[in-house]
Structures are given as C-alpha cells and as structure tokens.
Image (cartoon, helix red, strand yellow):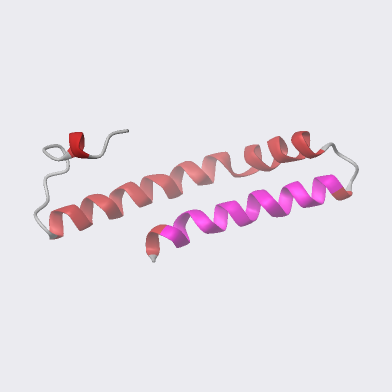
Amino acid sequence: MLLTTEVAEEFRKIFKVTEMEIKNGVDELQALEIGKKAVREDLGKELADCLAYLCKLANYFNYDLEENRGNYLF
C-alpha cells in the first residue's frame, strides 16, 4: 500500500495542474508538460522511497534481488 500511495499523490498533482492549465486555455500536450515539470522533483523523491521499500521487503524475506534480476527482465 505504501508503494502505491507514494506515487499516486504525484499523479494526482500532475492531473490537477494539467486540468488547471487546460482550463486556462493551454494546449493539452503543453498542459501535461507543465504538470510533469511541476512534480518532477517530488516524484524523484517518491520513487526513491519506493525503491527503499522494495529493498526493505526483499531484505525481510532474505531475497537476493541481484541474484534473481535476470528472471524478470523484458
């Protein structure tokens, strides 16, 4: 749940800023870019938190992420 909460709020911010910009007459693609720029720094922090949670989960189960990384690459 923490993983989705970390990133979901940033997506909400992107959509809110984008919607506001569109209402102000900005083109949709341009509005989306403005929204993305508005959350870029915070999103990086939230993604880092997600990575930390995943590492903690792997450690809790004594799961070696590096050893098993090849099994899930696309």
16 within the magenta span: yes
9 within the magenta span: yes
Which secondary structure type mostly characterizes the magenta part of the structure? helix
User: Which residue is outermost to the bottom?
Assistant: 1
Residue 51 higher or lower than 8, as above or below: above
Quadrant (top left, top right, bottom left, bottom right) of the C terminus: top left
Task: Please name whichever residue, 52 or 1, is drawn nearer the observer in this view of the structure.
Answer: 1
Residue 36 lies left or right of residue 47; in this view the side is right
Residue 37 higher or lower than 11, as above or below: above
At which x and y percent is residue 49?
Answer: 37, 51
At which x and y percent is residue 51?
Answer: 32, 47
Residue range corresponding to the magenta coloring: 4-22
Residue 35 higher or lower than 7, as above or below: above
Residue 17 lies left or right of residue 60; in this view the side is right
The residue drawn where x is 81% and y is 45% is 21
User: Which residue is outermost to the right?
Assistant: 25
At which x and y percent is residue 2?
Answer: 38, 63
The residue drawn where x is 45% and y is 57% is 6
Task: Please name whichever residue, 31 or 41, is drawn nearer the observer in this view of the structure.
Answer: 31
Quadrant (top left, top right, bottom left, bottom right) of the N terminus: bottom left
Residue 29 lies left or right of residue 55; in this view the side is right
At which x and y percent is residue 73?
Answer: 28, 34
The residue drawn where x is 69% and y is 35% is 33
